[in-house]
Image (cartoon, coloured by chain):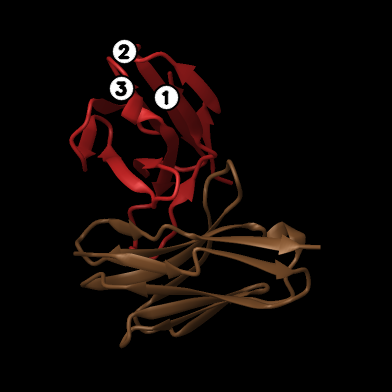
Chain colours: A red, B brown
Amino acid sequence: SQTIHQWPATLVQPVGSPLSLECTVEGTSNPNLYWYRQAAGRGLQLLFYSVGIGQISSEVPQNLSASRPQDRQFILSSKKLLLSDSGFYLCAWDVKQGRSQPQHFGDGTRLSIL
Amino acid sequence: KNQVEQSPQSLIILEGKNCTLQCNYTVSPFSNLRWYKQDTGRGPVSLTIMTFSENTKSNGRYTATLDADTKQSSLHITASQLSDSASYICVVSWNSGYSTLTFGKGTMLLVSP
């Protein structure tokens, strides 16, 4: 069966520090991968998606970046965190075949910026 | 602008009772509509996915309906359990050639003993 792992589960970082969140998927190959941010009281906001290794599309301008060094690995990074980067970050995957397949989410990383 | 509006924002019901959550959307062109359950501090989990031609779909005690003409969907929970306490998120997929989704803000359901 397929599983998705995100770590760390929680993270507290000072303003201006770097960030690296990692997501890995098991049990499937060549998935689409996504990074979302969920702010309190708001819907999920798509940050990045990837259809393959090294292929990253950004949905919103920000000081975050994403990379996909391996087929089932997706990394969210920042060189300098802002207070506004606080939130709940979710990684997700789905299959390429068919648009009526669900996205499968990890359990997220709660990021607090001090 | 593509939008998904959910109501109510929050809801408290007694264990064993039924409830219905609402979702209205303005997404176009429409591909499919999804309901997710999100427990506090966890990632969303898919409950149902309905395409344009489907007007009802069940998953255990969860039944989703879709009226593509009025652009409305509902999620009915039967015989609620304490474990149903969660946020329920309505998500609409665009027909834009990629898996692009518009998320509602969710309805927070609390099932009280």
**Residue B80 in the image: x percent, y percent?**
72, 70
Residue drawn where x is 43% and y is 39% of the image? A91
Q: Which residue is mark 1?
A: A21
Q: At 32% from the left edge and 64% from the top edge, which residue is drawn?
A: B93
Q: Earlier in the sequence, mark 1 or mark 3?
A: 1
Reading the image, the residue beneath label 2 is A16
Residue kind at label 3, given as amino acid type: Leu
How far is the residue under mark 1 from the one under mark 3?
Answer: 15 Å
In the image as oriented, which residue stretches furthest toward the right?
A: B113
Rendering quarter of residue B37: bottom right
Same chain letter for marks 2 and 1 = yes
Relative to A44, is B89 above or below?
below
Quarter that holds the C terminus of chain B? bottom right
Q: Quadrant of residue B4?
A: bottom left
Which residue type carries mark 1?
Leu
Chain letter belonging to callout 1: A
The local secondary structure at tag 1 comes to strand
Q: Is residue B21 left or right of residue A41?
A: right
Q: Position of residue B70 (x, y in %)?
A: 32, 86
Q: Secondary structure at mark 2?
A: loop
Residue under pointer 3: A82
Return the chain for callout 2.
A
Give the label, 2 or 1, closer to the camera.
2
Type of amino acid at the residue the image marks with label 2: Gly
* Residue A5 falls left or right of residue A61: right
Can marks 1 and 3 be said to lie on one chain?
A: yes
Q: Is residue A53 visible?
A: yes
